[in-house]
Image (tube, rainbow, N blue to C red):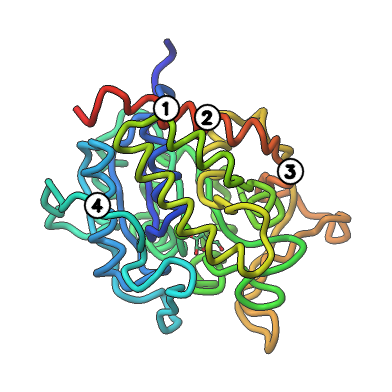
Amino acid sequence: MADRIPVILDGDPGHDDAIAWMLAASSPLLDIRAVTSVCGNQTIEKTTYNALRICTLLGLKCPVAKGRPTPMVAEPMTAAAVHGNTGLDGPVLPEPAMELEKEGAVELMARVLRESSEPVQIVATGPQTNVATLLVSYPELKEKIRGISFMGGGIAYGNWSCAAEFNILVDPEAAQIVSSSGLPIIMSGLDVTEKALIFPEDFERIRAVGNPVAKVVAEWLEFFYEFHRKIGYEGAPVHDAVAVTALIRPELLDMQDMYVQIETKGEYCRGTTVGDVRKTMNKEPNMRVCMGIDRKGFADLLVEAVKTYDKGAE
Ligand code: BDR
Ligand code: CA
């Protein structure tokens, strides 16, 4: 088999972050070198605790480090209505079996990049605070970044304001730094992630796999769906797992190269990902934007992923 891609998972877990990490850790194509937390769905204390509990459940043995307590410029904003008071309400999870690294998230990212002989892929499933701080603080390490696959934004619409999606709205300044970095970027925004619906019958397929990870994932999906069901969704939009799918099963996605700018000001549109769909700006694309997904293939991928935990967390 070809060499696995070294990966840093940076997120604000969060039910869909947790499922994204489950998917990443199941893949023989990826080699997870670090997990870093960011504030977003909940406070940094809570997302970090969740990150440790998820890694324990999955049997992930990589270093885990905590991000800063605030976005780069803005005040923190949380999503308790979606993910609950803990940021990961629902099933009981194991207590952390590992210690946090003493260094912070950005320093751990920098160390992983420095120590890697090959470029490292970053998967960002929360606000882009850590990734942008890494780019600003360690510009000499940019060449060690293979690319950034992020969940965030939406070309057509937002979810936290009319125009802006949560991850970008929490830290637009960070997203602006990332989008103008010149690095290979894949954006999985609401255009695709709201089509990445996992239906209640899929929860049952996952639960039926029967191992401890499968049972927890089915319960995470149930919790996550309950919020969305009440506002009219037919399934749980597992947003963050699309950013991992883009790396391990890109053929499930429709992608378009696009020039995308981040609105950092604006009375109504702060945090919007403004995509030049019609090429009116005559600019080189700065990212590959996922717009469509084979939903059934995505659901099957999650079912296959939970099966890899059959042998337990060792
Ligand atoms: C994004 O916001 C968070 O609530 C989810 O974890 C996802 O990353 C969707 O807008
Ligand atoms: Ca997230």
Give x and y (percent) for residue 19. 43, 45
Q: Is residue 185 visible?
A: no
- Mark 1 or 2, nearer chain start: 1
Near mark 2 (Cα within 10 A), the count class, few <14, some 14-19 or many ≥20, is some
Quadrant (top left, top right, bottom left, bottom right) of the C terminus: top left
Residue type at tag 4: Leu
Distance CA(mark 1)–CA(mark 2): 7 Å
Distance CA(mark 4)–CA(mark 2): 27 Å
Dot 1 falls on a residue whose secondary structure is: loop
- Mark 4 or 1, nearer chain start: 1
Dot 3 falls on a residue whose secondary structure is: strand
Q: Is residue 122 left or right of residue 226?
A: left
Residue type at tag 1: Ser
Where residue 27 is drawn, which disc sits there? Answer: 1
- Mark 4 or 2, nearer chain start: 4
Give x and y (percent) for residue 148. 50, 46
Q: Is residue 192 left or right of residue 110?
A: right
The residue shown at (55%, 50%) is 238
Q: Nearer the viewer, mark 4 or mark 1?
A: 4
In this view, the residue in front, 39 or 212, is 212
Q: Nearer the viewer, mark 3 or mark 4?
A: 4
User: For mark 3, what is the residue?
Assistant: 292
- Mark 3 or 1, nearer chain start: 1
Vertical placement of residue 6 versus 226, above or below: above
The residue shown at (31%, 58%) is 37
